[in-house]
Image: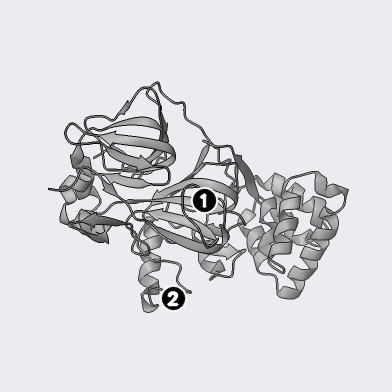
Amino acid sequence: MPENIYYLKNKIQEYEWGSKTMMSGLVDNPDAKRFAELWMGVHPKAPSMVLENGKDIPLDQLIETHPDFMLGRSAAKFQNKLPFLMKLLAVENPLSVQVHPDKEQAQTGFARESRLSFDSPERNYRDINHKPETICALSDFTLLCGFRKPGEIYDLFKMTLQRSLKEEIELLKKRDIKGFFRALLDFDKVRRKVILSDFSASASSRIGMQNEAFPLSMELIERYPGDITALIPLMLNLIKLEPGMALNIPSGRLHAYISGLGIELMADSDNVVRAGLTPKHIDLQELMNIAVFEPDTMIPFKPERNPAGLALYETGADEFLLAEIEVGQIPFVSPQERETEILFCVDGNLQISFKDGSPYNVKKGESVIVPCGAGSYSLSGKASVFSASVPARDL
């Protein structure tokens, strides 16, 4: 008989944009490495491990052995797979400008790239799944996401690059964001250098104080010399999240994380198509095919917390639902009928109790999976816990 909960042993991804300190208190980092992502889930690139019969096995193997107990009603819908991936994300330096495909695009792209080895750096598609995602801030968190209105983009470029991009800027008067974006990224190295130099001269003057996008682009130009996508802050919405605020990012939305610590929840996928601000593979043509070039407001949100301490983040995705639970004086009791959850304790300590048996202790930085078949549980202690689960609707 499977256990009521399993402690997860999670893998950490190290990238240049990660941080030596942001995960302090949640993850041990004695060698001061640049920790960027802590993965909680079953993705084959970095599956979580669990202890079963005295040995560590991948979480997906445990689920495949006990699909009904582990996943309940969602087992049939998602082919006995955990359909979401939860991450702790530490962004000290800006990430690449990127976009994620929808399901049809992912399936087509994965088939097209079958000639490439699975770990080839030229791959955009490492699975056949789409990748809608939700980012929830644990600290102040800054990102770029979704295109500004054409008139706003026009004003920002005219203010700084009217002479350098006179013809291209005219495309924005026709609301042709896609044409303008493509023109910008098609420039050769010499033209790019001139444009970036002209922008720096304009933005470093008094004009640079008129919009937050200007100093951010200046920072990106310094960090990525010669990369024309350093001007992307003039095209995308600059969004600032306070702790507890979240943003849903559907497939097709161009975005770039700039700074901060957060919880990221997504469909179980690692499909990324990049435009710039990265040494990794860039595929401009594929990005042009899958990105949405319509203006998008992209509204952050912060749900109300109910008396039980639960704040529910509606993601709109079939694969995942995010919640945060403040455990305090009154124990939190889950519904009797519930879906499989990954619980990640980001502050304090708590005890997870079921109808029978001793409670399980979970410390800050620890995560567990609570199978659907374990039934209702209660949380006591003093802690802040994030929950990732499958939405109950349509199951």
Q: Residue under circle 1?
A: 23
Q: Given contact means CB atoms under 8 Å apart, are the residues at marks 1 and 2 in contact?
A: no
The answer to whether residue 211 is seen in the rendering is yes
- Look at 72% across and 57% down and name the residue there: 219
Residue found at x 54% / y 47%: 261
The number of numbered badges drawn on the structure is 2
Q: Which of the labelled discs sits on residue 334, or is there none?
A: none
Residue occupying the far left of the picture? 1
Q: Which residue is mark 2?
A: 120
Query: In the picture shown, does residue 187 fall above or below 82?
Result: below
- Mark 1 Cα-neighbour bin, 10 Å: few <14, some 14–19, many ≥20: many
Q: Quadrant of residue 274?
A: bottom right
Residue 311 rendering spot, x and y as whole percentages: 42, 30
Sooner in the amino-acid sequence: mark 1 or mark 2: 1
Give the amino acid at mark 1. Met
Residue at 50 percent across and 57 percent down: it is: 29
| Real-space CA distance between mark 1 and mark 2, rounded to the nearest whole angstrom | 29 Å
